[in-house]
Image: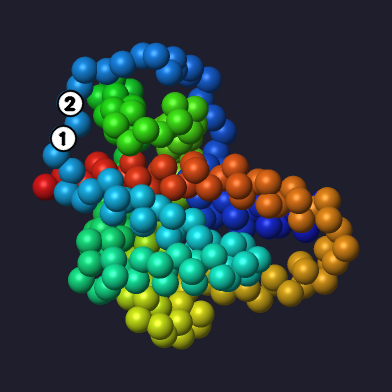
Amino acid sequence: MRNLLFLMVMASLFSCSSGSSSQTNYSSEHSYETSVPKQKYTEQTARILGRLYYLANPYEVARDPMQITNYVRANASLLGSNSEVIKCAQELGALMINQGIQNFNADGDREQMYNIGQSAGVDPLVTQRAADEMYNGSADLFFMGQELVWLARVIPSAAAGNWDLFNNTGSDSRKQFYQLWPLFQSMTYGDEYTKQIMEQAFKQMQPIVEYQILLLASMIQN
């Protein structure tokens, strides 16, 4: 159990989904008339960044490094140093670090959230959970910003075939995770229950994490 709790705490650092959810309920049939401002980055750009952010979390990298390797390889032409995905990561990361994103206005920003979610075809339950947890202040936006800025620095070289920066740099939390990963593996050797619990938790986390990046990137306007 201690092993599982440790990994869940570490995992929460790489997600906005670690807080408690609001009790507010939203109907999937409810529609909003508020128009979505013109976005600086396309939905495709935001989705690629969201998937990249998720696959780069240290648990997934340690568990199956070929996931992010194959994804970067498949999208290499979109991940150059001057690409929209990397520019988006740099700008969104800097915004989170330097300015932060304050609590959302219940009457304004939430409507924009749901418009973005509807136009992107996101599951209403995913949209609701992401919005509630971010609104409740459970997101560590500063840490997410650091990760995005780091990805913007290391992914272009990885897309060109050089993974040295990706493998040898990163935040203290990321480095600590990799240092403790072999210990966790040895302590859970043969413990299929714990492994299944972790894999299930991360599968449930994936759409939330990716939508949060999609949402935040979509709120950057020209």
For residue 112, above or below residue 65:
above
Residue pushed farthest right? 190
In the displayed structure image, the side of residue 178 where residue 42 appears, left or right: left
Cβ atoms under marks 1 and 2 closer than 8 Å: yes
Mark 1: amino acid: Pro
Q: Is residue 91 found left or right of 114 in the rendered image?
A: left
| Residue of label 2 | 35
Colour scheme of this structure image?
Answer: rainbow
Residue, x 33% and y 41% (percent of image)?
215
Image coordinates of residue 190 in percent, x first then y, are: 88, 63
Observer-nearest of 72 and 143:
72
Q: Which mark is residue 126?
A: none
Q: Is residue 5 above or below residue 134?
A: below
Residue 21 position, x and y percent, is 54, 30
Residue 113 at what x, y percent from top left? 32, 31
Query: Foreground residue, 92 or 40?
Result: 40
Q: Quadrant of residue 18?
A: top right
Hey, which residue is sitting farthest left in the picture?
Answer: 222
The residue lying at 36 percent from left, 14 percent from top is 30
Dot 1: within a 10 Å radius of its alpha carbon, few (fewer than 14), some, or many (20 or more) residues?
Answer: few
Look at label 2 and name its amino acid. Ser
215 or 103, nearer to the observer: 215
Residue at 53 percent of width and 47 percent of height: 206
Q: Position of residue 162 (x, y in %)?
A: 41, 85
In this rendering, does residue 156 appear at all?
A: yes
Task: Give the residue at mark 1.
Answer: 37
Residue 211, by quadrant, is top left
The answer to whether residue 173 shows anywhere in this view is: no
